[in-house]
Amino acid sequence: MDDRSKVIKYLNGGWDGVAVRDYKENDRLHRSVTRRDLLGAAQDEHGLSVITRYFEVAPGGYSTLERHEHAHAVIVLHGQGTAILGEHSYAIAPFDCVYVARDTLHQFQASEDAALGFLCIVDRVRDRPRLPSPDELKRLAALGVSPKPGVAEKP
Amino acid sequence: MDDRSKVIKYLNGGWDGVAVRDYKENDRLHRSVTRRDLLGAAQDEHGLSVITRYFEVAPGGYSTLERHEHAHAVIVLHGQGTAILGEHSYAIAPFDCVYVARDTLHQFQASEDAALGFLCIVDRVRDRPRLPSPDELKRLAALGVSPKPGVAEKP
């Protein structure tokens, strides 16, 4: 028996012993996002090939609009918000699942009056995100898709 | 852009377009468990290296007590129940996370009066489960750990 098996209790809006971390260190194209590494990141959980993270976006906040070669599996746990996937925008709510295919521009936005909390499952080894081009941003604007920050709130 | 990205809506206790399946086909050592393959099982989701499944155990039901070489990442979404992990038993409730390390005997039981729903994330390719030996069952009984079915309800 491998006795590293364990239960991580969810208590008072967080997980016992799991640190709340910065979403990213070197990127200011997001707002009010925290990250928790729930499963697969710890040294003693090396049996897992993926990392399950929990992201929480405060009301009005948003993740970086970006793309990468690795895919994401996302499951919403709390709140309300919007997912931008490529040239489309979707309302998302608890237990909705989101598949972010490789190379898809994507962003998660909380609504103005509710936080948005979701699981995001990714490979342990993955490529770095890339930002959209100015032409892509223009095209999204022409399509009525509204990534953040908007023109009026450039960081 | 890879336009296979998508949102799978959670509606009325299920996911839009996701079939409810049998938990296992050839094993009667479980009771009242259903499975839904949420993300990573479909042909058009090949960017994901893992499959995210949702299991629902009806009140009084339980999964098979078994072990395998692959690890599990589990996140509870609904209800109440018990996780047996090796020689220990844990109460579990929404958003608790469970790490099932490789080769750990494990079982998920719903409580008698509430269903238990949880996500279980596994590698796409994995080894087959193995059952406990009679000696292991005796040892669990001696330790006061209560896997199901019990002696009085052998299938």
Image (tube, coloured by chain):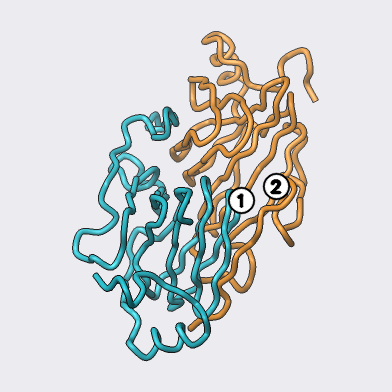
Chain colours: A cyan, B orange
Residue B14 circle label: none
Q: CA distance from mark 1 to mark 2?
A: 7 Å
Q: Chain of mark 1?
A: B
From what the image shows, is residue B49 above or below residue A85?
above
x and y percentages locating residue B63 in the rendered image: 67, 34
Between B103 and B134, the residue placed more toward the observer is: B103
Which of the two discs, 1 and 2, labels the residue nearer the N terminus? 2
Quadrant of image for the N terminus of chain A:
top left
Considering depth in this image, is A99 or A115 the residue closer to the camera?
A115
For residue A144, side relative to residue A12 (left or right)? right
Q: Position of residue A142 (x, y in %)?
A: 48, 88
Above or below residue A109? Residue A46 is above
**Amino acid residing under circle 2:** Arg
At x 34%, y 45%, the residue is: A36
Q: Is mark 1 in CB contact (under 8 Å) with mark 2?
A: yes
Q: Which residue is mark 1?
A: B53
Looking at the image, which residue is at 49% across and 26% down?
Answer: B86
Task: Say whether residue A145 is left or right of residue B133.
Answer: left
- Toward which corner of the image does residue B45 lie, by quadrant? bottom right
The amino acid pointed to by label 1 is Arg
Looking at this rendering, what residue extends furthest in the left direction? Answer: A26
Whether residue A6 is visible, yes or no, is no
Q: Position of residue B20 (x, y in %)?
A: 76, 51
